[in-house]
Image (tube, helix red, strand yellow):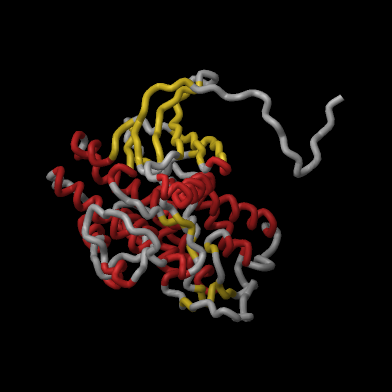
């Protein structure tokens, strides 16, 4: 008779998974990477083995290896490489990561053969790094070999071995020194490496790619120039800002019906009236599926009411972090109208609406969180 294991007990897996070696893919400072085939599901996977060249750095780099596993396990985005499984042996300070095989080339080689794809790849890169930014993850090793392009044109950000999750302002200290392929920004003189620094390196990467490939049909030159400014105060501050700027520019070419404009404006007016101030570390939610799903739940729970009993659940669908808000007075019909728009509008219109909403929220007062601030709304 079988019994259900007690919570917390170790579950042994009896069958070892066997893989077939296809070919080596490369050797780096932290180990080698090979291509494997899983015959059971007839699929190719990449295996990254931790085996550093320098034995003196084995322990230090092993921590980078573990960090990469953790970060990759927490991200799910079409422009970031996926991790399938991992095997770690701490006593021997080694391990393996099994991850998605990106069948294609690095972005530099891809653009030499396909310069006409530059605009689409630029937008995909902005989207992927904006997602990492929304997860509070710094990549910290932005270079052509770490941005791959699949044969179907999908861009993939890889190698988070030097990645870092940030949770406080001290996490933006420049704590690593790499051999950068371009002139470092002025951020380094101040000992800072933050999301704006990543904007700079992505901008410089595309600036170099465009120059080397002699590309003339790039559509986002003004935005790229602002990304590449060495002085942080003059640079576009985040990938989310860059993404919103692109969306707002696209909105000029998209025709909105009068009822769609009205639905958006009533909703944006109500949201911006109810949020009184936002903590400087708060982030906008950018995942449209998540926003729609949470707003549907809020609507279902108050559809028979004239007003939302508490608009906090609605605001949490749009913002993460801390902010001050007015609890009552949000009309249910405003949410109903906006949801009808989201259900029927194509994704492009929804992205434009979200970018416009973020621009509206940018005008709300920001405040710095104090160490012992007990005037927190929730």
Decide: is 7 above or below 227: above
Front residue of 146 and 303: 146
The residue at 47%/46% (across/down) is 65
Q: Is residue 347 visible?
A: yes
How many marks overall?
0
Residue 176 in percent (x, y) is at 37, 59
Could you tell me which residue is drawn at 51 percent across and 47 percent down?
Answer: 66
Asked whether 44 or 20 is in front, the reply is 20
Farthest front residue? 56
Q: Which of 87 and 54 is in front in this view?
A: 54
Q: Quadrant of the C terminus?
A: bottom right
Residue at left offset 24%, top offset 55%: 204
Q: Residue reaching furthest right?
A: 1
Q: Is residue 289 left or right of residue 328?
A: left
The residue lying at 51 percent from left, 64 percent from top is 167
- Residue 277, position in %: x, y? 51, 76
Q: In x, y percent, where is residue 20?
A: 47, 20
- In the image, residue 267 lies at what x, y percent? 51, 64
């Amino acid at each position: 008779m079988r019994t259900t294991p007690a919570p917390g007990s170790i579950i042994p897996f009896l069958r070892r998974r066997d893989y077939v070696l296809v070919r080596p893919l490369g050797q780096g400072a932290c180990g080698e990477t090979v291509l494997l085939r899983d015959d059971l599901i007839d699929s190719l996977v990449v295996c990254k083995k931790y085996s550093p060249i320098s034995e003196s750095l084995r322990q230090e780099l092993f921590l980078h290896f573990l960090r990469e596993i953790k970060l990759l396990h927490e991200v799910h985005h079409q422009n970031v490489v996926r991790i399938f499984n991992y095997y770690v042996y701490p006593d021997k300070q080694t391990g393996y990561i099994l991850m998605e095989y990106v069948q294609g080339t690095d972005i530099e080689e891809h653009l030499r053969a396909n310069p006409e794809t530059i605009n689409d790849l630029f937008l995909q890169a902005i989207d992927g790094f904006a997602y990492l930014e929304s997860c509070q993850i710094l990549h910290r090793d932005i270079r052509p070999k770490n941005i791959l392009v699949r044969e179907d044109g999908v861009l993939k950000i890889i190698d988070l071995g030097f990645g870092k999750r940030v949770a406080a302002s001290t996490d933006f200290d420049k704590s690593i020194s790499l051999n950068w392929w371009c002139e470092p920004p002025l951020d380094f003189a101040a000992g800072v490496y933050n999301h704006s620094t990543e904007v700079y390196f992505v901008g410089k990467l595309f600036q170099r790619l465009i120059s080397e490939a002699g590309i003339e049909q790039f559509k986002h030159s003004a935005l790229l120039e602002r990304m590449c400014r060495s002085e942080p105060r003059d640079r576009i501050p985040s990938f989310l800002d860059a993404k919103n700027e692109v969306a707002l520019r696209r909105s000029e070419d998209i025709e909105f019906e009068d009822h769609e404009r009205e639905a958006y404006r009533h909703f944006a007016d109500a949201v911006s009236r109810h949020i009184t101030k936002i903590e400087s570390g708060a982030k906008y939610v950018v995942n449209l599926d998540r926003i729609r799903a949470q707003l549907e739940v809020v609507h279902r729970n108050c559809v028979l009411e004239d007003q939302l009993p508490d608009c906090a659940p609605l605001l949490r669908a749009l913002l993460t972090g801390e902010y001050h808000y007015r609890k009552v007075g949000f009309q249910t019909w405003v949410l109903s109208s906006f949801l009808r728009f989201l259900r029927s509008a194509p994704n492009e219109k929804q992205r434009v609406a979200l970018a416009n909403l973020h621009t509206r929220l940018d005008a709300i007062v920001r405040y710095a969180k104090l160490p012992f601030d007990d005037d927190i709304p929730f």
